[in-house]
Structures are given as C-alpha cells and as structure tokens.
Amino acid sequence: MRRDAQLWELTRDLRPTISQRNRTVPEHLRVPPPRVPASPHLPPSRSYLCELAAAYCILPTAYCLRLMKLLVIKLSSIGDVVHALPAVSLIRRELPNAEISWIVERRASDVLVGSPVIDDLIVIDSRSWRAQPFSPATIEDYKSCRRRLGTGFDVAIDFQGLLKSGIVASFSGATRRIGFETSELRESVSRYWLTEQVTTSQCQHVIQKNCALARAALNQSDTAPLSESTLLGNYEFPIALSRDDELYAGQIREQMGGAFAILNPGGGWPTKLWAAQNYGALADRLWTERSLPSIVTYGPGEELLARTVADSSNSGRCTPVPSTLKQFVALSRQASVFVGGDTGPLHLAAAAGTPIVGLYGPTASARNGPFHPDDITVSRDLWCRANCHRRKCWHWECMDIRVDSVAAAVADRLDRIVSLGAMK
C-alpha cells in the first residue's frame, strides 16, 4: 500500500496535464484521468497507476514491474503442479521484480515450498473443508485464504481449468484473469470467470500449453519463437531441496552400493497401475542383465504395494524405500533410470533430469509424458486409448504390458546414456 501511495504522489503533477493532452490526440490514444482515491490512504489500483506512469515515461519500467502482483492458480495434482513450474519460471525470468503468489492444495504443496520463483505460497485443504465445512478450523482457514487473495492482484493465471479454480480467480479481484480456450478447459463452465482465453490447442505437451498462458500474461505473442532450450525440452523446474534431502539420497545410494534404478508402482488412478509382480520381475532382469539393483519408492499408504513388489523379486536386489516428495527428487537425481506410470513421481523424475521409461495406459504420453528426446514411453495400441482418461474400466487392457517390452525399453534407455557419454 505504501508503494501505491508513493506512485500516486509521483503522478500528482501529471494529472492536470492529462485533460490537455487528450484534447490534442485521437480518441483511441487518450488516457483517462486517474480516479480520485476514496481517502488519502486508499490510492487507485496498482495496475492502473503502473500503466499511467509507463505511458508518460515518468518511472523506469523496472519500477512499474516491481509493483505487479500475479496469482498462479494450480491447485493439484503433484504432476500438474510440476508441469506448471516452467511457465512460472518464464514469468519470473521476464519479470524479476514482480510479486508472484501461488495457491495450491496441501497435498501437492511440498514441491513448491522454498521455490525461488514464488514469493507467497497460499496453501488450502479443500478436502478437509468439504469433510467439515462448518468447523471453526475450516471457517478460519477459509477467511485467511480470502484475506490473502484480496491483496490487490493485477493478473491471475488459471492453469487448472476447473470450476473451483475459476472461482479462485474471481476471488483474487484481478483485472486480468487468464486461462485456456474453452475446448481445452477441464470444466468448460470455468470460462465465465476468465477475462482472457488463450488458444493452446496447437500445443502438444501440457508444459507448452502452460507456457502459452505465461506468454499471454506477459503480453507476448503466442507465435513468438521458442528458445532452443525450450524446443529441446530443457525447462526450468525450480524445486528447492534441503541439505537433509540430499543426505538422505546419498545414504540410499551408499546402501545400494552405487548406481540404482527407481521403480515406482504407485499411482493415483487404478487404471494407471502396472502389476506389482511385473515390477518384481523387472527388478530381477535389471540385476541379472545389468547388475543394477532397484529401489521401490513409495509414499503414504503405499508401503504394502512396495512390499509386494519386493516380495515378487527373486534376486533380493529390490529394496522398498519411503520418501517425501523432495527426498524423491533427490533420489531421482542419483538414479540411473526411473520406471513407472503416468503419476506424480514420474514427472518429478523428469524435472530432476532422470532417464525415464514411462508406462502409459489411459493417458497420452504426447501430452503428459517425459519431454527429454531420449526418454521412452511404453504403451499398447488399443482401439479404446484415444481420449480415454478413465479412472475405471470394465476391461482394463491398456496396462497389460509385457515385462519383456519394458525390460527392452529400459535397456535401450540405458544404452542411450552410454552412447551420449561416449559422444561427449
């Protein structure tokens, strides 16, 4: 608020000249006079004053950009949050002095804690809100969220495309509320809360779609040429790891005797799961053919599944390893290869630069898959897979992928690492 008042004072001598200037220019170039604040302590909106100051060149551009407040709306899931990070990094790179807030669900928030591209992380827990809508804790959390959303945002970017994310955008009070074109929204009704919709159907991968929204917020053309690093999939994923996270990964590597593979059998959708026995058989193949031991990573509620994978392995070189999200990122940076379905850990591993073999069933790897050109996805060519996205299925054939096919893909991916090292 103090900076708004300073800017209001800086434009004080300018205001009487605006009406004179407007009489000498065409109508479409006229600038409306600043609105008189309701009180000396409540100056006009930050975005209006920034535009006014920039138009008359009375302040440096950097000062105007410093006043911009931007809200990122990407509530969940873990993979979706990871896919939005490159777009927010793009905004931070172009507007280093902007104030960027991100609203996210608690279950996906750990990835964003401490990220250098975020100034304020607004964490909500809509599940507990729905479970106990009238509890004092829920009411207080809701009020706190509304207070933090009502701090004068200039731009809100809805990367989610849901009804609830559209409502969050409207609560922000932002004059610009940017989202996907209607055909790309997950819930088309959310378009009623947007002031700008960006054409993204020409983009194949979801990260490219998110970056298109970021360019719109920056008033950059959707057809602006992409940098070479972006074309190669070298996106920025500013995930902050602690020293303890790094030490944990180092301890696991030492226990495994050096190089290891990550097998991740879990997933949010039942239709994305590959059989635990298949992972166990794959661990045996990696050990006998590559002398590569495996760790089976798991999160809360997945320990039994990880134990089943280990018990299905006959080599004894398959070890269940619990981890937090950031510990998993640290482990991924140490791993030789990651094998798993289209779920949060795969996208975290991709963000960490881990070589990946992804197993895809009801979702499309072209949209949600790993983006490094050497990564490999394995799937079945079935009549029902196009635009499936089903969490339940009456026949569920798409994840009936042979172990031989996955083992061959892993061998191919590891060979590409060796070839790249030889080239270097």
Image (tube, helix red, strand yellow):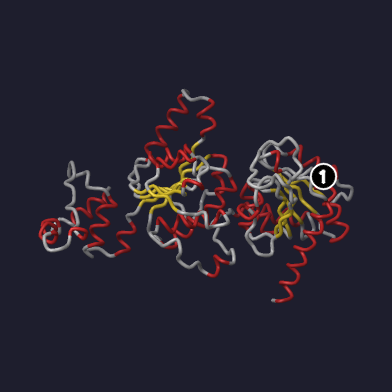
Q: Nearer the viewer, residue 4 or 367?
A: 367
Locate the C terminus by quadrant. Answer: bottom right
Q: Name the residue rendered at 68%, 45% in the picture.
A: 362
Identify the residue under disc 1: 310
Other-residue count near label 1 (Cα within 10 Å), few / some / many at <14 / 14–19 / ≥20: many
Q: Quadrant of residue 350?
A: bottom right
Q: Name the residue rendered at 39%, 36% in the picture.
A: 146
Q: Looking at the picture, how far across and down is residue 264, in whole percent?
A: 72, 48
Q: Name the residue rendered at 30%, 59% in the picture.
A: 64
Q: Looking at the picture, how far across and down is residue 195, in whole percent?
A: 37, 46
Q: Is residue 98 left or right of residue 41?
A: right
Kindly give the residue lying farthest to the top in the view shown: 134
Q: Is residue 122 left or right of residue 35?
A: right
* Vertical relation: 287 (above or below) 362: below
Instruction: Determine whether the residue tagged by mark 1 lies in a helix, strand or loop.
Output: helix
Q: Looking at the picture, how far across and down is residue 330, in whole percent?
A: 65, 55
Amino acid type for the residue under numbered disc 1: Ala
Total numbered badges shown on the rendered structure: 1
Q: Looking at the picture, how far across and down is residue 273, in whole percent?
A: 73, 43
Kindly give the residue lying farthest to the bottom in the view shown: 423
Q: Nearer the viewer, residue 258 or 288?
A: 288
Kindly give the residue lying farthest to the front in the view shown: 383
